[in-house]
Amino acid sequence: MLQSFDERNADILVNINGELMHRDAARISPFDSVVQGGDAVWEGLRVYDGRIFRFRQHLDRLHASAKAVGFTVIPSHDDIMTEVRRTLEANGMRDGVHIRLTLTRGEKITSGMDPRLNTKGPTLIVLAEYKAPVYDRSGLVLATSSIRRFPRHMLDQRIHSNNLLQSIMAKIEATNAGADDALMLDEHGHVAETNATHLFFVHDGVVSTSDVVACPEGVTRSVVLSICEADGIPCTVRDISLEEAYAADECFCTGTMGELAGVVRIDSTTIGDGAIGAMTDRLSARFAEVVAAEAESVL
Ligand SMILES: Cc1ncc(COP(=O)(O)O)c(C=O)c1O
């Protein structure tokens, strides 16, 4: 699914360290850490009718990621919420909006990777765009990537950083294979996630997903797990081989960008009967209910 340009985003204002600028004028310095080394952490947020789903949980993950990579100054949740609100208000945005929230280590006094060169504090970027859930609801095709996710002892993927080359290279492989996204394995050959979302499988009515050993914690993933628990749907977190993935009755991926989206083929294997499954539909509907009931007001 190739995203296309949405005309409603032609004149949006982008917030960089509190300054709201037209998208064509919005710029960060070539000395910024994200330019110098991908040295930044980020979150994707979704706005539903003036409310953001699991806003605090996203900000907790942003804070934990920034702390894990040693940012010395991290804006408070309240300060970030204020800038998000200002950005939405300035753009008159209320619904169907996705926010890319980026916190970089900030500008350096000279080029280089040493964080001691950062003397100006972090850079906070709030980029809000009109964006419907990005995945095609008729079902996704995944292609297994030759690129594997780092294990925790190499680079803990729970750090939600802007070092995205691993994912981008996997996405290129998937595109070349004619697929929508890449299925990525961990160092042992178990399913880790896709290049951008978590993966769930259904076998004989039992839902399963991988542990977060080679992928970030997921906000959407955690909601699906709690729905299963609340509704008495059998659910396990375990190692899943590629063969088990092929043999699943259903498969779906989860993420803020695309919510829940069914997968109908992995490599050359059709999943189940090749249509979106009943459990995927049921959990998608329940997810929408939870969002409607629990999204936090920001406007
Ligand atoms: C690599 C990766 N996997 C999965 C996800 C989905 O996580 P969430 O449900 O919190 O959006 C993301 C989202 O940013 C991601 O970057």
Image (spheres, grey):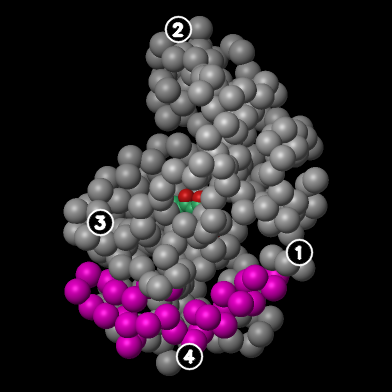
Of marks 4 and 3, the one in the foreground:
3
Please identify the quadrant where the C terminus is shown: top right
Residue in the picture at 32% in, 82% down: 274
Which residue in the protein does label 1 denote?
294
Task: Give the numbered dot on residue 174.
Answer: 3
Work out how far the residue at label 4 is from the one at label 1, CA to CA, in angstroms: 27 Å
Q: Could you say which is closer to the camera, residue 136 or residue 101? A: 136
Tell me, yes or no, whether the two marked residues, 2 and 1, touch with CB atoms within 8 Å.
no
- Residue 268 position, x and y percent, is 19, 74
Which type of secondary structure does the marked residue at label 2 adopt?
loop
**Residue 211 visible here:** no
Q: Amino acid at mark 3?
A: Ala
Q: Amino acid at mark 1?
A: Glu
Which residue in the protein does label 2 denote?
110
Q: Is residue 277 within the magenta segment?
A: yes
Q: Could you say which is closer to the camera, residue 242 or residue 264? A: 264
Task: Give the numbered dot on residue 205.
Answer: 4
Work out how far the residue at label 2 is from the one at label 1, CA to CA, in angstroms: 45 Å
Tell me, yes or no, whether the two marked residues, 4 and 2, touch with CB atoms within 8 Å.
no
Count of marks overlaid on the render = 4
Residue in the picture at 38% in, 41% down: 164
The image quadrant of residue 210 is bottom left
Residue in the picture at 48% in, 90% down: 205
Q: Earlier in the sequence, mark 4 or mark 1?
A: 4
Residue pushed farthest bottom?
A: 204
